[in-house]
Amino acid sequence: MVEKKKAVKKEDMFEDGDDSLVIDFDKVEGQSFESIPKGTYAVVIEECEFKMSQSSGKPMWNMVLTISEGEFTGRKLFTFLSFSEKALPGTKTQITRIAPELLRGPFDPKKIAAEGSLIGKIVRVKTKLETYEGEERTKVASFLTSASSDGFED
């Protein structure tokens, strides 16, 4: 469950002149998220952006998925599909599960993302938990085919 933070009040912020802003962070609660449990979830692709990876400089799709069923409805999952030479076999497998029709003929990931043809598509994902910077986070492990016999888990 997402912890609700209290709204920052104007009296917790001090303006000092025209261009200066000072915030009293002692009065601002931090934000934290409870991980979504490992499982299988129905999701809607909300965003699919073509960009270059900051770490490798290789092309990828940066995707935002929203859980569409069960206890975690509305929660977001963030994932990417890499188009680096090394990642192409795995990426092809994932695209086959998401939208196999995209693999018929020439494939232009930048154009597909710009057209928004994946936006609104309902798919299933399997998630896992990983530790990142000392915090447990939910990661998309893989996309699943609709023909899979796995049921959805909350």
Image: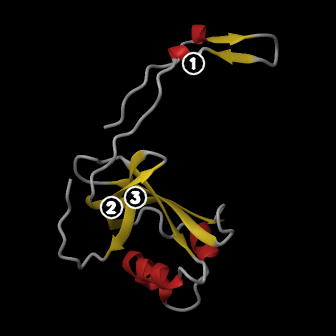
Q: Are circles 2 and 3 on residues that touch, CB within 8 Å?
A: yes
Percent x, y of residue 95: 44, 78
Give amino acid for label 2. Answer: Thr
Q: Which residue is mark 3?
A: 139
Q: Earlier in the sequence, mark 1 or mark 2?
A: 1
Give amino acid for label 1. Answer: Phe
Question: Which disc number belongs to residue 127?
Answer: 2
Residue occupying the far front of the picture: 134
Closer to us: 39 or 7: 39
Asked if residue 90 lies left or right of residue 86, the reply is left
Q: Is residue 126 above or below residue 103?
A: above
Closer to us: 55 or 45: 55
Does the rendering let one see residue 115? Answer: no
Q: Earlier in the sequence, mark 2 or mark 3?
A: 2
Instruction: Name which residue lies at 64% across and 63% down.
Output: 55
Q: Earlier in the sequence, mark 3 or mark 1?
A: 1
Residue occupying the far bottom of the picture: 105
Q: Secondary structure at mark 2?
A: strand
Q: Quadrant of residue 33?
A: top left
Give amino acid for label 3. Answer: Lys
Tell me the CA gap for discs 1 and 2: 34 Å
Q: Secondary structure at mark 1?
A: helix
Instruction: Name which residue lies at 65% across and 68% down.
Output: 56
Instruction: Name which residue lies at 43% across and 24% down.
Output: 5
State which quarter of the image contains the N terminus. Answer: top left
Q: Are circles 1 and 2 on residues that touch, CB within 8 Å?
A: no
Q: Label 3 neighbourhood size at 10 Å, few (<14), some (14-19), many (20+)? A: many
Q: Which residue is mark 1?
A: 25
Q: Is residue 101 above or below residue 134?
A: below
Percent x, y of residue 83: 58, 77
